[in-house]
Image (cartoon, coloured by chain):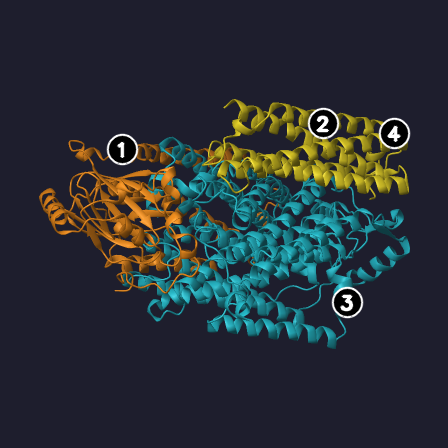
Chain colours: A orange, B cyan, C yellow
Amino acid sequence: MKNKWGKYGILLAVAFLLILTAGCSVPVLDPKGPVGESQKNLIVFSIIMMSLIVIVVMVALTYMLVKFRERPNRSDEDYDPEHEGNTKLEIIWTVIPLIIVTALSIPTVITIYQLEDPPQSSSDKEPLVVHATSADWKWFFSYPEQKIETVNYLHIPTDRAVEFKLSSADSMASLWIPALGGQKYNMAGMETTLYLQADEAGTYEGRNSNFTGTGFAEQTFDVHAEPAEEFQNWVEETKQSAPELTQDQYDELLAPGLLQEMEFSSTHLEYVDHGSMDGSDYLIQRHGTEAFEDIPALEGGEDVAND
Amino acid sequence: MDFLLNEFLVTGDPLIYGAMVSIVLVSIAIVFVLTYFRKWGYLWREWLTTVDHKKIGIMYIIAAIAMLFRGGVDAMLMRAQLTLPNTEFLNSQHYNEIFTTHGTIMIIFMAMPFLIGLMNFVVPLQIGARDVAFPFLNAVSFWSFAFGAMLFNLSFVIGGSPDAGWTNYAPLAGPNLNPGPNINYYLLGLQISGIGTLATGINFMVTILKMRAPGMKLMRMPIFTWSSLITSFIITFAFPILTVALALMTIDRIFGSQFFTLTGEGMPMMWANLFWLWGHPEVYIVILPAFGIFSEVISTFARKQLFGYKAMVWSMLIIAGLSFLVWVHHFFTMGAGAGVNSVFSVTTMLISVPTGVKIFNWLGTMYKGKIRFDTPMLWSIGFIPCFVLGGVTGVMLAMAAADYQYHNTYFLVAHFHNVLIAGTVFGCFAGLTFWYPKMFGHKMNEKLGKISFWFFVIGFNVCFLPMYFLGFMGMPRRTYSIEPEWMPLNVISTIGAVLMAVGFLVFVYNIYYSFRYSEREKTGDTWDGRALEWATTTPVPFYNFATVPEITGPEAFWKMKQEGGTTYDKENLEPIHMPSDSGVPFIMSAFMFVAGFGLVWEWMFMAIAGLIGILACMVVRSFDYDHGFHVSVEEIKETEEKAREGEK
Amino acid sequence: MSGHSELTTGPLEYRSHEDRMTVLGFWLFLGAEIALFATLFATYAVLFGRTADAPAPQELFEMPMALTMTFLLLTSSFTCGIAIHEMRRGSLKGLLTWLIITLALGLGFLGFEIYEFVHYAHEGATLQSSAYWSSFFVLTGTHGAHVTLGICWAVLLIIQLKKRGLNQMTARKTFVLGLYWHFLDVIWIFLFTSVYLIGMVV
């Protein structure tokens, strides 16, 4: 039977892929914080349920193909061209999927609601507020309480929730740090909130996952998660050594293009809040559409993607 | 001259020069062949002016296969870039254009026309009609699709292709961030072909509701006809939303309104909502007819009645209803709030229930059957496991909290290819090989068909299974460069894509091979069929049925074969009224193309000239009262006797 | 089409199978039109209040004008109904007379709408000035474009009726035009309430 080979092939391919990926980092399935953890649990639960369905269908299909294929010497006893339905069976295979959907819906809805609030495990501390603003094709991270701002990287303390206030100066982006948890959109003229938390210190990759044009692939950043004390040291150091961010300089940085990592001892929030309706045309007012007419070959940013 | 070289023509890329040269060469070759063999008149009389649903269906399918080739080339270029990321085979801009045209072409100009082509050919035959309800409108549908597709494809060499993804999200695609003609091509190409699709929806609803053979009640209709009716319903109510969305963005870009802009308090996110309000039903527009095809094929080759006919119909109706209630799941990450996301999570997962019922009903159809493994059946069997995989990953994506991790990644890419290729493309191939003898009078070669099936289906799994893992590894979609650790899986994926390409090429070669060598059909009933399309002769006479039989139950032709019955009742022949051919649809659509091209470049004189042309065609049509002619009884007799010689 | 009987009684426009299909097809088309206008209304509702620096609607909308336009269009719908009634009675002259009255009322409506648009533009509210005004002009403009198309269509029909008199084909065309005209009237009622009335109050 050729068809069986097809299925063996699929199984083999899956096994092969598992071996191949064994050595690589799979951040979604190996999260470093409670948000990613609850999502991973949901994912694993759903994979198990779904595998059951796939197996049932595969087995049933193989059975039908083997047993009822046309072959020489097959008696006509089990051939019934008039056979057209079986109410009992049909009810069964309507109700069982309904039960499965219910079983999946409950944890899904619970998790959806949980993720709207900061993680429980650090509820004793106030979340750290970071405004993450995307612009073509870079990230600004503003710490309003600490009065510092970074470009294309950020530091966060471990074991404390981070409350990201997301907005965009131009196209819609999506802030995604797979090792810490799922993403949310950055949009011009409105503000969204995303809670993430790192439980382990380390450097994680973050990126914009939503297509934004020419420099999209390079719109990445590093997240340095470190214990509270180290984080505090970094804040102090930045405050003292980094220059202030003037409005003129900020406007210049906003122009479409790539940027190196940078840090400043003040934030752009005093000039504009891209997350409000008033701020949504700030970039267009400064740069016009001409800036987007002929995008020059991109350079100046760090070559993150290919190193 | 400066304008011509710097803005009008796309310059500076060897791939595009190659495309230009090949377009010119192919055009010259076509003109030469047509002139040399004196086929201009034939082309005009038999094809460009035809209103015959069978010819229109065939033209749809030919165009769709050409577009499948174009979209496939795009896919291969993308795979090449992702396998050789450091060679800058494509730069970012070029890659962006290519994934945009790949998506748009595959959905709008490949999947939909392919299925509409099959619907065109098959539905009137299945219900015992002589043509569709509005044959003239049907020709308008086809030609507006063809000219819309042409306009869209032209962007590759003139002005630059759209580059904001097939979803064309604002504000990226809006006038602020993306000036120039490229996005205009997307908007107007889709708008022009969308008008045709809407007309098709209305046309087929009326055809199926009003033109069935006497005695064919709704619940006696073949299941493919049912799927076409439901699809037409979705088209009729979903496409106006796209029309509006496209028009609003066109007005934004060309006339300076502020719907989706960053300025003037515009609301870019409204585009995403409008787009998916149409876009999700669109997914079912391209999957339901495929379900219908699989049902026909599985029942024919299991040589059994379809299991659970009523449940099949009801599940399609429920899917159609739910398809309008799930659009938010395309942007769970927009932050609409827990309540909204929960509701749309659950409605999305609910769709899996009727879909699951259909899967089990297909298995039930095989139960106690006598299964033959001809090529159409192979595609249908291959569909089940591959589609189930796409279905279950769809359920995983529907779980909003988990979707935050899948969204915008290769997990998503793998999922929708798993449903759209296993569902729609396998369905198109199954349908085409199944009805091929009816269309052209000979089968497609079985051996080549099987080779192409195995290449395609194995390549398909090798190509897309690794992508699920790439998603977990954090690889975003639409990126032209990759990180080193994503490399091995991308290479495997590319190998799969090459296998698929081989499968496709064998399929196309098979068309040529079968044309040359396949045995010609002697009867109208190639596969021991069950529905009415097999009751008439092959090739089908232009009036389809000399006499329309009285239908007494489901599976009309199966019953006729057992109880006797014919579509050529010599005693009761009557003159048949048939619609006249017309060149107006072709000319009118050509004017749409002119108007569209004018708008793309914001040349208002050209747009207005095109518009006047369209209106003039409508006036001509309005004053034309000669809509048909009668086929005499003698001519019917002559045609039928000749066609039925082989059967004796 | 054999198998589908031709009627010899009943309204002229329903007698042949083709007629019945055309009328059903047109109803479905109107269904699609409803989806189209629903999308435009939804867009308008979403963008309501986003006037940016342009004047707010309550500063510009005037009750007398909106009421006059409503009166003109509603009356034209009524006269269109009388025209169809005359057609059913078999009176070509009556049909033509009432159709022309309908046309005149429709033209009057259009005249007011154009005046209204020009007036708003003078006050600083144009298609370009803000999201709200974009949606206002496109929503009402789409309706106006439909009315314009309906008027052109009616002119073509009047010529055909003059040339060919009342027969099955012209009767069907007239009837379908009537459906279209009433549909535009229904849309206007929604426009009047949800754009003008609400716009003046909120």
**Letter of the chain that mark 1 sits on in the rendering:** A
Q: Which mark is residue C94?
A: 4
* Residue B37 in view (yes/no): yes
How many C-alpha atoms fall within 10 Å of the one at disc 3: few (<14), some, or many (≥20)? few
Q: According to the image, label 1 marks what residue?
A: A117
Q: CA distance from mark 1 to mark 4?
A: 71 Å
| Mark 1 crowd level (few <14, some 14–19, many ≥20, 10 Å Cα) | some
Disc 2 chain ID = C
Name the foreground residue: B14 vs B641: B14
Vertical relation: A20 (above or below) B366: below
* Residue linked to disc 2: C72
Residue C49 on image: x %, y %:
47, 31
Measure how far apart labels 2 and 3 are at the Cα level.
53 Å
Q: Pick the residue in front: C95 or B439.
A: C95
Tag 4, which secondary structure? Answer: helix
Q: Position of residue C67 (x, y in %)?
A: 65, 24
Q: Residue at x 65, y 58 (%)?
A: B594
In the image, what residue type sits under mark 4?
Gly
Q: Which mark is residue B42?
A: 3
Same-chain check, marks 1 and 4: no
Instruction: Quote the CA–CA distance across marks 2 and 4.
Output: 20 Å
Q: Nearer the viewer, mark 1 or mark 2?
A: 2
